[in-house]
Amino acid sequence: MPEIPVADSKAVPEGEILAVNVSDQAVAIARVDGKVYAFDDRCTHEECPLSDGFVEGAEIECWRHGARFDLRTGAVTLPPATSPLVVHAATERDGTIFVVLAETAPAQ
Ligand code: FES
């Protein structure tokens, strides 16, 4: 998958979340301890946007029912979600954030 520029670095301050569209896919970008993370902007519990949630340490908390996911791995750290979050590779160069979308299996 290609590396795609998605946002200016200044658009994602520490602890904030930015919703972006990457190749017609809803992606959220968050910054924790200076590092950027990219993940599907859709909670795996009932599919609400995680960009409206809260960053707590290296976790994203869904605003709706409180599920939490590890931003580094996508692992569920607090129910009610049971399926992991899809995380994407995110890097930052020269004031721009780039994302490489994760390969995901097609919907059945
Ligand atoms: S929709 Fe996210 S926890 Fe329910």
Image (cartoon, rainbow, N blue to C red):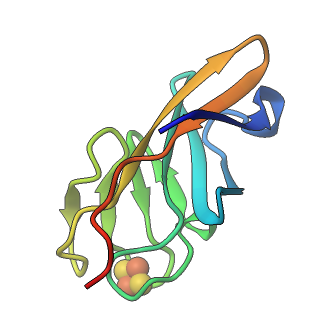
The foreground one among 99 and 12 is 99
* Residue plotted at (35% across, 50% down): 103
- Taking the image as shown, residue 25 lies to the left or right of residue 108, namely right
* Residue plotted at (20% across, 58% down): 77
If the image is split into quadrants, where does the C terminus sit? bottom left
Q: Residue furthest top?
A: 94
Q: Position of residue 70 (x, y in %)?
A: 30, 48
Q: Position of residue 65 (x, y in %)?
A: 39, 84
The foreground one among 55 and 73 is 73
Q: From this viewpoint, is residue 65 visible?
A: no
- Taking the image as shown, residue 76 lies to the left or right of residue 62, namely left
* Residue plotted at (27% across, 65% down): 105
Query: What is the count of numbered marks?
Result: 0
* Residue plotted at (51% across, 44% down): 38
In the rendered image, which quarter is residue 68 located in?
bottom left
Q: Position of residue 40 (x, y in %)?
A: 48, 61
Task: Identify whether 83 is placed above or below 96.
Answer: below
Q: From this viewpoint, is residue 27 visible?
A: yes
In the rendered image, which quarter is residue 15 located in?
top right
- Taking the image as shown, residue 7 lies to the left or right of residue 29, namely right
Location of ligand 1 given as a quarter of the image? bottom left
